[in-house]
Amino acid sequence: DTQTISGNTFTTVLTQAITPAATSSKVLIHVNLNVTGSVRYSAVKLYRDSTQIFLGDAASNRSQVSVASLINESAGSSTDMMDHSSLVFLDSPSSSSEVIYYVKCANTYTGGSYGTGATTYINRTPTDSDSDYQHRGASSLVVQEIGA
């Protein structure tokens, strides 16, 4: 599916549950995501249940994200493009109960004329016009138990 996310509130775009066989199990997470935005600051965060995991270091006002998009509407013909973002992370949930992984996206830009109204697009280009060079993408979240 395509998705349009307005503003800088991170919104769930992919989710996957897994129940590890043992508390010593690890979970290998693969995310492939087509994401772009109205300005170049669209970003992706990975969560285990309500905890953000696989995030950048804390530093002053910088957003702690998993990956970020480079493509944006304000850069020439990039209104006709999507950016592919991916991540691989080995998690240690320390649980034998169901764990739910979430991929959340938003635009972190809050300045200029966009304010908090910047838009993030999933699996589509910003213009999404009916042309052969306008693409629709597919995104995935795969979780795999390692060593029970």
Image (cartoon, grey):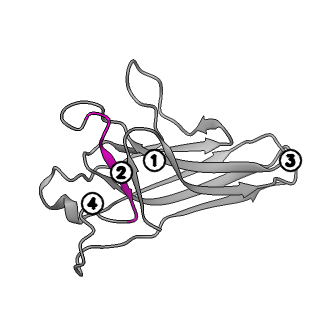
Discs 2, 1 touching: Cβ within 8 Å: yes
Q: Is residue 94 above or below residue 33?
A: above
Label 1: which residue? Answer: 105
Label 4: which residue? Answer: 126
Residue 119 belongs to the span the image colors magenta: yes
Residue at 65% over, 50% down: 101
Quadrant containing the C terminus is bottom right
**Amino acid type of disc 1?**
Cys
Q: Earlier in the sequence, mark 3 or mark 4?
A: 3
Residue range (magenta): 115-123
Residue 110, quarter of the rendered image: top left
Q: Is residue 92 above or below residue 77?
A: above
Foreground tag (3 vs 2): 2
Q: Earlier in the sequence, mark 4 or mark 1?
A: 1
Q: Earlier in the sequence, mark 2 or mark 1?
A: 1
Residue at 67% over, 45% down: 91
Left or right of residue 77, residue 99 in this image: right
Residue 3 belongs to the span the image colors magenta: no
Q: Position of residue 34 (x, y in %)?
A: 40, 61
Foreground tag (3 vs 4): 4
Q: Earlier in the sequence, mark 3 or mark 2?
A: 3
Task: Count neighbours of disc 4 (C-alpha within 10 A) and say few if under 14, some if 14 to 19, many if 20 or more.
Answer: many
Q: CA distance from mark 4 to mark 2?
A: 8 Å
